[in-house]
Image (cartoon, helix red, strand yellow):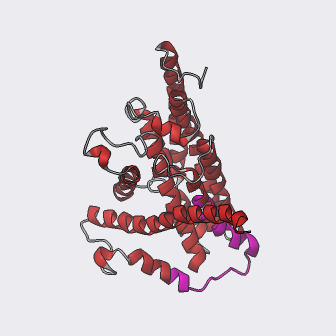
Amino acid sequence: MIESILPFLNQVYRIVFVLIPVLVSVAMIVWFDRRVWGLVQKRRGPNVVGPFGLFQTLADALKYFLKEIIVPASANKIIFILAPIITMTLALIAWAVIPMSENFVLADINVGILYIFAISSLGVYGIIMGGWASNSKYPFLGAIRSAAQMVSYEVSIGIIIINVLLCVGSLNLKDIVLAQTQVWFVLPLFPMFVIFFISALAETNRPPFDLPEAEAELVAGYQTEYSGMMYAMFWLGEYANILLMCALGSILFLGGWLPLFDIAPFNLIPSPIWMVLKILFLFFLFAMIKAIVPRYRYDQLMRLGWKIFLPFSLLYVVLTASFLVYFDLLPKGKIQ
């Protein structure tokens, strides 16, 4: 009896071991985001609750937890309640395939990159459901914008990933990291890294592309009618997605858990710490952009995605493939 339960318990333990750090990281990353924003504007940022204001996010979470959940009378109640649950769940299950080191990954599947791509594509459903079920014009407009924006930028992210896959010859995230032992892909594919980073901003509804929740014209976008813990779940899903994009960027372009230089003292630092440092570096760029870049207009956002990023990334795929074939650098035994 116990032998039959052990594999199940082992799996539950591993899932909890991945989920709890992600949830704690989300709390800390919100503090970091607000702190950077404050420092750019020559103020302190959160600095009252706990040391350096570290517990501010927990205090905010407790406030949301204790607030009343109000479901509008005209809303489609079931879909209204399901929307934040779907958003948060999808944001968290994508972490199953993210490798923090060579042996530290929950599900080492051969199609890891496709799995992440599929989950991030589904993320838009939570937002559409929330906007539509609210039965109010502002949330609905916010949801339409969000859907169009995420679909537009997913196309260019997919094509950017093709560049990396051509150099690796595998869809496994571990293989992608191990292929960067000689040189990180950020150097040969630097234009793709820049486009990936900007597309990740649009994909996660971060400034300057936070049009779905543009306070000036749409109140709070698709979150307008939400309150209490349901609002907090949207917020949690959003930051978990941002961290996921930072993790993906570090795996595809910054060598994942690999050290900066393969010499002491760099290679003495444990692999997961390198991974965390790279995620933090990318998140710092996210936070800086939020603080210093004005919001895009909706038509500019669409133009950038379809008329600039998409053709340029397609052209770069052709250039990468041509270069690899001409110099006979295609991954042997994988793509032939």
Name which residue lies at 63% across and 52% down.
Answer: 119
The x, y position of residue 276, in whole percent, is 39, 54
Q: How many marks?
A: 0
Which quarter of the rendering shows the C terminus? top right
Residue 108 in view of the camera: yes
Q: Is residue 224 above or below residue 300?
A: below
The x, y position of residue 294, in whole percent, is 39, 55
Q: Assign the magenta stretch its main secondary structure.
A: helix
Q: Which residues are magenta?
A: 63-92
Of 312 and 295, the residue lying toward us: 312
The x, y position of residue 117, in whole percent, is 61, 46
Which residue is most to the top? 326
Name which residue lies at 40% across and 29% down.
Answer: 188
Q: Is residue 159 left or right of residue 35?
A: right
Name which residue lies at 38% across and 77% down.
Answer: 55
Q: Is residue 164 left or right of residue 267?
A: right
Of 215 and 284, the residue lying toward us: 284
Name which residue lies at 46% across and 65% down.
Answer: 26
Q: Is residue 166 above or below residue 273?
A: above
